[in-house]
Amino acid sequence: MAGLGVWISARSQENPTRSAASANTNDVSTSLPPRCRTDQLTWQVAQRNGIAGGSIVLKRLHNISHQGCSLQGSPHVHTFVTAHPSTALPFRQETTYAPHPSGSVVIAPGGWASFYEIIHADNYDPTLTLPPMTSRWRLPGATQPIATAISPSHTITGGYRIITVFVSNIYSGKFPSHTPGIQWSNNSGHPPLPARQKKDRE
């Protein structure tokens, strides 16, 4: 993809290990370890699959601390113009999340968790100008970002007018479960399009 779509893919590849988090087992008892702190986890872009009009990106969270922790729900992403965070984006971005939070995920010390994003781009405009932009991801319930991606420092000409992003729940382990149609191991397949997505309220 051109414009923002290229930036999203390229930034992820250039920064394969940004802070991130989680995962080992789903806790079935009534007692859970404390919620994961941002400084307990590292972030990694594990796979990227091309699909019609976009891509699906697998991201992993790794517990680098000596304490277990738990997470529930979806990471949240916020994109803004780097120099002027309060101004409107030059394109329409619609971010949705898994409609129902999954069960709590317990991440043991040294354990992993994972989630995925489905990114679609529509209405390419060769005259659209894209200033430097920043995207930040934060864990469920966290206030500080666990990962930050910044687009090139120069203005880009040409981009998509509509960007849609779906963010899944966090799952235990290095590969999300319950994703029929996605073959994570060989980096192929097409993800199911989620229904009744929850609008971003940020």
Image: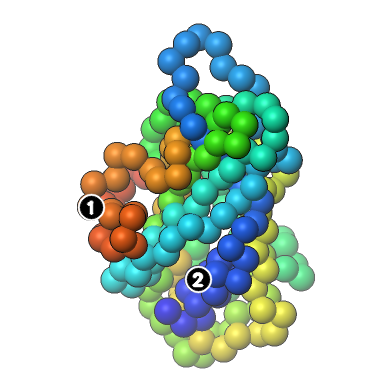
Mark 1 residue type: Gly
Location of mark 1 (residue): 181
Q: Nearer the viewer, residue 49 or 126?
A: 49
Asked which secondary structure carries label 1, the reply is loop
In the rendered image, which quarter is residue 188 located in? Answer: bottom left
Q: Is residue 164 above or below residue 195?
A: below
Residue, far right = 83
Res. 175 visible in picture: yes
Q: Is residue 135 visible?
A: no
The disc labelled 2 sits on which kind of residue? Ser
Which residue is painted at 51% across and 87% down in the image? Answer: 158
Camera-side residue of 134 and 11: 11
Q: Position of residue 53 (x, y in %)?
A: 33, 72
Label 2: few (<14), some (14–19) or many (≥20) C-alpha neighbours in 10 Å: some
Closer to the camera in the image, 91 or 66: 66
Q: Check disc 1: other Cα within 10 Å, few if <14, some if 14-19, many if 20+.
A: few
